[in-house]
Image (cartoon, helix red, strand yellow):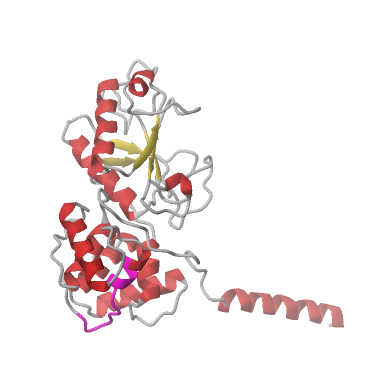
Amino acid sequence: MSRHLRALLIAITCAIALVVTATPAVAYPNAYFHTQSAGNRGADVQAIQYLLQHHGQSASADGVFGSGTTAAVRAFQTAKGLGVDGIVGPQTWAALAPQIQQGANGPAVRALQVQLNAKRRLSLAVDGVFGAAVTTAVRDFQSHAGIGVDGVVGPTTWRNLAWHYDYPDFAAGLCNQNPDGNTSADWGTAAAIGQLEAAARTFAGTGQGQIPVGDIGWEHGGAINGHSSHRVGLDADLWPIRTDNAQCSAGRITWQSATYDRAATRQLVQAIRAAAPGHVALIFFNDPTLISEGLTSQYANHDNHLHVRYCEKVEPNSLYDC
């Protein structure tokens, strides 16, 4: 074997070894706590409510950030010497989240179980018991996120869990209609998903069919085919409602179509806004009547779908800051 061929084989072998032994890719190297405040819904809110209970505050763990949760947050912030604004930003999140591991029990474990179920699509019992199954789920998540795998839930694990995106429950009045081949682009922040699911439950009560969901985002965010946005888990595309209520089976239409149901689509928009008070930045959809009513806004190429943009009180990207 020639010296050059030997050197080439060694280089290839080393490259393969690096691929095999490399540390798993970090799910999101700059993970941060998504800010939650009055009007938000979802798994992050429910986890916060359980963490407030862990600290002796009175909060109903219903996943809705209402006046009672705001009061509990303000009381916690006062007790901890934090800025008292009723908003759970990074500092309040960090103060709420204790270090826990196998053998722990109580509301903080319930918060962890809620997060693992939502962010990893699990079905752990939310019983407040940190047993073997929870330990396995924690270790699996830590491996997934590329952080230290020890089964102990400390600041880094809490931050990565809170940052990680959530996946919608398509049994709750939604159907999956991803265009452009983005078949798994259904992930969004816990608040965005919780608010969308709440709107779907309200709309389901009208008996006008399911809500077709197009693209939301990838599991860990980032660029998505066919969109300049949809990168931070706060954008969701929905299809308008048809007069035959077959929007999940008969194909997408535009607001000019004969089968377009303006009244039902209006109800959908109203349900979206009502489910997330103060957290809907905009809804692009080019129906001139809905635009004149202040329900949607005009934007090029939005004749056949509604683009819902959620926002938070504090968000690193100014486009999503309420």
Secondary structure that dominates the magenta span: loop
**144 relative position to 124: left or right:** right
Residue located farthest toward the top when viewing the structure as drawn: 258
Q: From the viewer's side, name the closer residue of 67 and 248.
A: 67
x then y, percent, for residue 8: 78, 76
- Position of residue 16 relative to residue 66, above or below, is below
x then y, percent, for residue 264: 25, 25
The answer to whether residue 168 shows anywhere in this view is no
**232 relative position to 289: left or right:** right
- Which quadrant of the figure has residue 68? bottom left
The C terminus lies in quadrant? top left
Q: Write the residue at 46% across / 44% down.
A: 319
**321 relative position to 180: left or right:** left
- Position of residue 251 relative to residue 54, above or below, is above
Please check the rendered image and state whether residue 94 is part of the magenta-colored stretch, yes or no. Answer: yes
Specify the segment rendered in magenta.
92-104
Q: Write the residue at 42% across / 64% down.
A: 32
Please check the rendered image and state whether residue 87 is part of the magenta-colored stretch, yes or no. Answer: no
- Position of residue 293 relative to residue 3, above or below, is above
Q: From the viewer's side, name the closer residue of 61 and 72.
A: 72
Q: From the viewer's side, name the closer residue of 269 and 102.
A: 269
Q: Write the residue at 53% across / 40% down.
A: 226
x then y, percent, for residue 139: 36, 76
Q: Write the residue at 27% across / 62% down.
A: 84
- Which quadrant of the figure has residue 166? bottom left
- Position of residue 170 relative to residue 46, above or below, is above
The answer to whether residue 97 shows anywhere in this view is yes
The N terminus lies in quadrant? bottom right
x then y, percent, for residue 133: 26, 76
Q: From the viewer's side, name the closer residue of 84 and 46.
A: 84
